[in-house]
Image: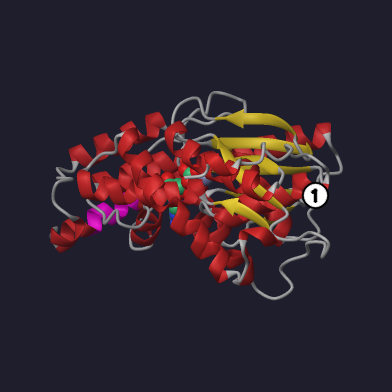
Amino acid sequence: AGYYLRGMPKGFMHIEPILRPLLLSTTKGISDLILQDLLARYGGVAPKMAEEAHSQVIDQVVQDALDNANLTEADLSAVAVTIGPGLSLCLRVGVQKARKIAASYQLPIVGVHHMEAHALIARLCERDLQFPFMALLISGGHNLLVLAHDLGHYLQLGTTIDDAIGEAYDKTAKWLGLDLRRSGGAAIEELARRGDAESINLSVPMKQHKDCNFSYAGLKTQVRLAIESKNIDAGIPFSSASIEEQGLRADIAASFQRVAVLHLEERCERAIQWALEIEPSIKHLVVSGGVASNQYVRARLHEVVAKNSLQLVCPPPSLCTDNGVMIAWTGIENFRLGRFDPPPPAIEPEDCQ
Ligand code: KG4
Ligand code: ZN
């Protein structure tokens, strides 16, 4: 935590000085890096393999975070750790580590929900962000529209009925033969800048459903069919395709992005109306999660929010994609209100190995 917090711009932090640092387990963040690495190397990930990879690095990662912050475990006041959602075997590695530190130093533990952390990190970035506010959380596994009444008190306005938008970005990137070493979403965002967003005819999902839910499975199918109809071979990497075909791939990326984001715009528009009826004092829409680091997404949603006289709050991209700061921050928010578990039983010397 210290490592990330130190790297932030001056004036960014406003934690009460009485709180000594909270350590976080960056399990979910590491998780994605490890999963991507395994995916790139082996073309797939078995949960057991991912668990082993996590176990191998967890001690070093925690030690590095402490070293970077010039802290030791004895300096901590609590341990925050992701408890879900995610691959349970991997989450367990983080939880076990957190319990071990907490037991050794008799520290309270704060269990953190990954998606709540995506929303709450916005309160670290924007000091004026008070409850109630709205949040659109867009990641690889989730698409959520929520009304945040108060800490731990959220009303779900919409969710995905199948895939999340990040999954659609990732599959489109794969089918277009893009370099997946960084995220598929970032690769599509970059390629889309070179394409004609109106060139491929794709329809906006769930037009006939007048609610705030999402669906990206159908759009994925539309994209795959468009790719097939243009005879694009996903097996040929983008860089090896002809100039003409690269242009075609860029057109598909841009058209996909336009429609994927239009779906977000429409749902947000309706959700704002719903939310204001329930809580007329709402002033902000938070957009967070990996996909919220996309500049096109941010610009389009800014329009929607401004039209409705609200303010958009997007954390900087490094805090939108999975990161440890958001887990630590959510730990701090809960800790301040006394919401934590007592320290686990102290480890007896004979239990230590
Ligand atoms: O929140 P996150 O880091 O991890 C999960 O909790 O899933 O989100 C990861 C997702 C991936 O699908 C990734 O492709 C997407 O966020 N993403 C982006 C961008 N950067 C990451 N999608 C669109 N544009 C981006 N620039
Ligand atoms: Zn996430």
Residue in front for this viewpoint, 186 or 39: 39
Q: Amino acid at mark 1?
A: Lys
Residue at the extreme bottom: 10
> What residue sits 82% from the left and 65% below the top?
17
- The answer to whether residue 201 is seen in the rendering is no
Q: Quadrant of residue 344?
A: top right
Q: Is residue 52 above or below residue 61?
A: above
> Is label 1 within 8 A of ligand 1 (CB to nearest ligand atom)?
no
> What residue sits 36% from the left and 54% below the top?
188
- The answer to whether residue 27 is seen in the rendering is yes
Residue 99, position in %: x, y? 59, 41
Give the residue number, with chain letter if any, for mark 1: 283
Q: Quadrant of residue 231?
A: top left
Q: Is residue 180 left or right of residue 100?
A: left
Q: Quadrant of residue 299?
A: bottom right
Q: Is residue 153 above or below residue 129?
A: above
Q: Secondary structure at mark 1?
A: loop
Q: Is residue 190 left or right of residue 10?
A: left
> What residue sits 47% from the left and 58% below the top?
61
Type of secondary structure dominating the magenta stretch: helix
Residue in front for this viewpoint, 290 or 168: 290
Magenta region, residue range: 247-253
Q: Quadrant of the N terminus?
A: bottom right
Residue 126, position in %: x, y? 74, 60
Q: Is residue 55 left or right of residue 65?
A: left
Magenta-drawn stretch contains 221: no
| Colour option used | secondary structure
Residue 272, position in %: x, y? 72, 39
Magenta-drawn stretch contains 252: yes
- How many C-alpha atoms fall within 10 Å of the one at disc 1: few (<14), some, or many (≥20)? many
Residue 332, position in %: x, y? 73, 51
